[in-house]
Image: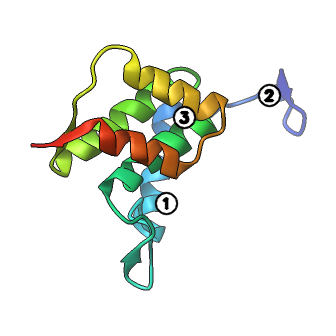
């Protein structure tokens, strides 16, 4: 495939370049701490963790591994904020799959994360 204007091969962005663009945009316009009027948009860390699952798994930003990355991101976020997911094995992966396939809400995901977590 060629670039019609220049009759040259099409040049694609590398993953590294896209991640640098993302980093620059976050630095310029703000990051994932969604706030309005100084208040977080989500009520607690479980709703915030659910947002990672909901948006990453639902929007498929990666070619592969979106559900795994979504769940791992939520787990790391919870761990950094004083909670650990108790469930092991496929139960959590099944929850993420159900959330996406059945179009569950962030509140639905948050309730399951809350029930499957313990303070550390």
Circle 3 sits in a helix, a strand or a loop, which is it?
A: helix
Who is closer to the viewer here, 32 or 10?
32
Which class describes the residues within 10 Å of circle 2: few (<14), some (14-19), or many (20+)?
few
- The relative height of residue 7 versus residue 90 in the rendered view (above or below) is below
Describe residue 90's horizontal placement relative to residue 9 as left or right.
left
**x, y percentage for residue 79?**
19, 42
- The relative height of residue 74 versus residue 72 in the rendered view (above or below) is below
**x, y percentage for residue 4?**
90, 34
Q: Which mark is residue 91?
A: none
- Quadrant for the N terminus, please: top right
Residue at the image point whose x is 31% and y is 56% from the top: 45
| Residue matched to label 1 | 25
Is residue 114 visible to the viewer in this orientation of the structure? yes
| Residue matched to label 3 | 57
Circle 1 sits in a helix, a strand or a loop, which is it?
A: helix
Q: Which mark is residue 8?
A: 2
- Quadrant for the C terminus, please: top left
Describe residue 52's horizontal placement relative to residue 115 as left or right.
right
Q: Are marks 3 and 2 in contact (CB under 8 Å)?
A: no
- The relative height of residue 43 versus residue 11 in the rendered view (above or below) is below
Who is closer to the viewer here, 95 or 1?
95
Who is closer to the viewer here, 67 or 115?
115
């Amino acid at each position: 495939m060629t670039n019609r204007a220049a009759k040259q091969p099409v040049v694609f962005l590398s993953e590294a370049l896209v991640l640098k663009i993302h980093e620059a945009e976050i630095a310029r316009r703000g990051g994932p701490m969604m706030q309005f009027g100084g208040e977080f948009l989500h009520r607690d860390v479980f709703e915030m963790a659910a947002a990672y699952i909901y948006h990453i798994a639902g929007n498929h930003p990666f070619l592969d591994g979106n559900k795994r990355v979504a769940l791992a991101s939520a787990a790391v976020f919870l761990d950094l904020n004083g909670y650990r997911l108790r469930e092991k094995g496929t139960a959590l992966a099944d929850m993420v799959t159900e959330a996406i396939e059945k179009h569950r809400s962030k509140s639905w995901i948050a309730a399951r994360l809350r029930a499957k977590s313990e303070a550390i």
